[in-house]
């Protein structure tokens, strides 16, 4: 990925977004107002450190709700510096399942670079990809009791934005 071009694309996309938000009503240019495309990634499972799936594909200009669900017994990170530079984050939500319903506990806005999800918990990353590219730096950097990171055990992945 060419970071310089990605930055230009981000600046252009932000200009479009700001222009859309300052208008009197939502228009077709309001990327953040779309119904999100939901994608779920499982962060590990008991006894296994892995992203499932570990190959993710997104398209520029579409709103995604990336659900990071950790059903394992360890905390896990979803870290990809390259990915974080190719998207515009609308918000990140901490959610919890209560009586079969998903309840939002907190919402964060602004540029996000990585998310850590604790055992048995979930978070949602709402974003719009603003640059195309392929990155292979998705990883969980948590170090286990054996001195190796979860990434060393295979908790890595690839993200393609088309
Ligand atoms: Cu991990």
Image (tube, grey):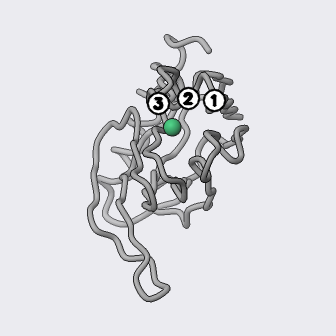
Q: Position of residue 157 (x, y in %)?
A: 66, 31
> CB at mark 1 closer than 8 A to ligand 1?
no
Name the N-terminal-most of marks 1 and 3: 3
Q: Nearer the viewer, mark 1 or mark 3?
A: 3
Residue under the point 33% across and 36% down: 111
Foreground label between 3 and 2: 3
The residue that label 3 is drawn on is: 144
Task: Count all numbered tags in the image, as a single digit.
Answer: 3
**Label 1 environment density (alpha carbons within 10 Å; few <14, some 14–19, many ≥20):** many
Work out whether residue 65 can be spotted. Answer: no
Where disc 3 sits, the SS reads loop
Mark 2 lies on residue? 139
The answer to whether the residues at label 2 and label 1 have Cβ atoms under 8 Å apart is yes
**What residue would you read off at disc 1?**
156
Left or right of 109 on screen, residue 155: right
Residue at far bottom of view: 99
**44 relative to 81 in the view: left or right:** right
Q: Residue at x 67, y 29 (%)?
A: 154
CA distance for labels 1 and 3: 15 Å
Distance from Cα at disc 3 to Cα at disc 2 = 14 Å
């Amino acid at each position: 990925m060419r970071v310089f071009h990605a930055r230009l694309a981000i600046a252009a996309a932000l200009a479009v977004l700001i222009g859309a938000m300052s208008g009197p009503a939502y228009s077709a240019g309001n990327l953040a107002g779309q119904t999100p495309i939901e994608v779920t990634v499982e962060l590990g499972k008991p006894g296994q450190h892995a992203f499932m799936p570990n190959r993710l594909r997104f398209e520029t200009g579409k709103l995604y709700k990336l659900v990071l669900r950790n059903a394992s017994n360890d905390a896990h990170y979803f870290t990809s510096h390259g990915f974080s530079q190719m998207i515009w984050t609308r918000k990140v939500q901490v959610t919890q399942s209560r009586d079969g319903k998903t309840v939002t506990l907190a919402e964060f806005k602004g540029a996000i670079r990585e998310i850590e999800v604790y055992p048995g918990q979930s978070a949602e990353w709402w974003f719009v990809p603003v640059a195309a590219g392929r990155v292979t730096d998705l990883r969980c950097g948590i170090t286990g009791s054996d001195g190796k990171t979860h990434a060393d055990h295979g908790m890595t992945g690839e993200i393609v934005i088309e």
